[in-house]
Amino acid sequence: MRKFGRRLSVPSATSQTPKWRVLRPHWTAWADVRSVQKNGGLGGYAWTTGLVALTTLLLWLPRQLFEPVNIALLYLLPVLWSAVRWGLWTSFYAAVLGVMAFDYFFVLPIFSYAVSDLRYLLSFAVFLIVGALTAGLTSSLQHQAQDAHRRETVMMSLYDLSRHIAAVKNIDEVVEAVVRHVSETMGVAVWVALPDSAGRMAPTDHAARSAGPWNPDVLQWVFQHGEPVGFGQRHEPELLYIPLKTEETVHGVMCLGEYGQGGRFDEERRHTLAALAGLAAVSVARVRYEEAARQAQLMAESERLHTALLDSLSHELRTPLTAMMGAVDHLADGQQTLSAESRRDLLATVRDGVMRLNRLITNLLGMVRLESGMLRLNRQACDASDLVGVVLRQLQEVLKNHPVSVSLPDNLGPVMVDEVLFEQALVNVVSNAAKYSLEGSPIEVVFTAMAPVLQIAVRDQGVGINPKEAAKLFEKFYRSPQTQHIPGTGLGLAICQGIVQAHGGRVYAAPNSPTGTVITIEIPWTPVA
Amino acid sequence: MDATILIIDDEPQIREMLRLMLHDFGYLTYGASTGQEGLSMAMAFHPDIVLLDMGLPDMTGTEVLKHIRRESAVPVIMLTVHDGEQEKVAALDHGADDYVTKPFGTDELMARVRVALRHRRELPEEAAIHAGPLVVDLDRHSVERHGEAVHLTPIEYELLRVLALNLGRVVTHTQLLHQAWRDASYENDGHYLRIYIGHLRKKIEADPARPQFIITEPGVGYRLVDPDAQ
């Protein structure tokens, strides 16, 4: 094993200059072989010597009771023991030592070696075989146990990380969890870089806060080629760039370690890292795809809304324009022939078209203002009867064929609303009541003070509503299927709701009895003491 | 009658429409498409009325108004779009006489023009102001409706007097408060104004929920109108 000098800043001081290396998989194979070999060191030999000596001592006194064969068998014990504890070479040593001790102390003539003792070479061979087998078995068992342990560590680590990032929805949190977890597991500094929309590696927020040790060119290379790169010694790099890769796609790069700070990554740590990087890559990919899916869904939704809006708008805008154009052309063509009455009717058509367009544009602008969040309330103490008066005056034309009754409690006191906006909300509700009921049918506007709210109910005896769609009425662009024949954009009540909610109130619809609809606006209200 | 009217609006279509309309009613018109042009024409021709669009390309309507007011007391009627009550109030408090909201009808515009011309010509020296069946006698501090005396408190009378002096013309909340109370501010005392207007309506209107005399201009102020002239 080559060790590398600590002073990376002066690499020329050693023969091993640190280098950028692409880390190829065959390293793993080499490392596996190395890890099987182990060595008990001198301690193992000393212990083995002691064990053989002890066996000899214990067998010395009762030597008359045993056959030499039995004694020879007992010398297997140190061989087995040293094979289990210190491996192959130590067990061979125990075998040699054991056979020599047996021959010297227990085979007649004792305290000497004789040529006839060569027959015990067979025992010696058996000792060697037993030692080798035991050492092999033990070593493979230990190796398996080590493997199991390492796998467990990796699994635990993966499990921990996956638990942390399973529920995370946003990419920054995923990166943060990965960085925190990997740096805890590995005990080194960790950075994650993700590509920007143009495919350039850009440090994430987390990395930007503490400038990483990375080399931008290496980062880009790793991102493009999807292969890990290390800096430092061949087998013990101290800086790693690991691509976060799923299948063929590289989602980012994780960088670990720091120049000159040690933090070497041996094979075991690299295994763990590879697994963690895989999980991180899957998580990053998951969040990315989720984001993309959400975007796509939003796009589809907004496209649907836009299509609905455009259809409805082009219809709503063109209808009055068509009527006006026809009326104006007819007036121009028939200047001499038209009766005064038809001329008046045609002019009324033009005027109606203008009013309708004006209402539509007012509502559209109102919707834009509500949606853009530019709605600022200018709340003032308003007089309820004054509010209704303005609404009825604004709707004079619309209401000319509907008797309207207003019921207001005496001494209601001031109502804190934005005068102009709240009137628009009321105008939308009252004009709806007129629009969806037959000419001549009455409309009631009823104020009820029920501290802490003030209820304003607008009751008509028109087409009514299906209780199931009561809530839908207030959705933007919603038109009830049973009133499709009546022109409208489905904006009026949505705007009304926006304004009422901005006042901290609510608006809801219910069927009126026996027929028609009640739209109720509720706003916070405090009675005057 | 040959009154002259200066139209300052950047839209040729609107200028043309106003020119045709005003000619038919016997007025002489000039047209200007920018604030600068409008200002020089106002100085050169001394019109009797200025119709000023609030959304000019080169200056805001209020800026043009301020420049005009430095030189002359000519009545200025603002042409505004629906939203922007603040803008209307600011212009009125800076000396604009009235406003019409686009799109406006002929009747509405002509009513404003007539009121502005009357206020320009007559000095308010008359002893009584008539708004249809409503008569405000400034000498005797009394009010009659359909020949019957209406009893008002001093503040109610003061409010009605200010509105009557501006008959047909909008009066902003601030202007009303200043003239009726002197030391009041709209931020603090706006609700008193609403309460007294409510009382006043109960005394002079047949149906206070459908006022005929005192019309609310939402977010701007009040206007006393002659119901018979409408």
Image (cartoon, helix red, strand yellow):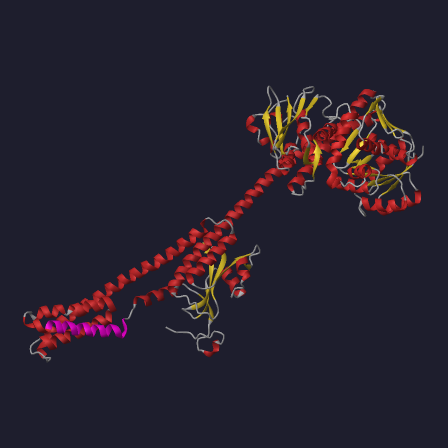
Which residues lie in the magenta part? A40-59
Q: Position of residue A424 (x, y in %)?
A: 69, 33
Q: Judge whether A491 appears above or below A72 on screen.
A: above
Q: Residue at x 50, y 53 (%)?
A: A173
Q: Nearer the viewer, residue A523 or B23?
A: A523
Q: Judge whether A417 appears above or below A517 on screen.
A: below
Q: Position of residue A324 (x, y in %)?
A: 76, 29
Q: Residue at x 44, y 78 (%)?
A: A15
Q: Position of residue B20 (x, y in %)?
A: 87, 34
Q: Judge whether B76 appears above or below A139 on screen.
A: above
Q: Position of residue A63 (x, y in %)?
A: 7, 72
Residue A390 placement: quadrant: top right
Q: Is residue A284 magenta?
A: no
Is A267 positioned to the left or the right of A378 in the image?
left
Q: Quadrant of the N terminus of chain B?
A: top right
Is B83 positioned to the left or the right of A286 in the image?
right
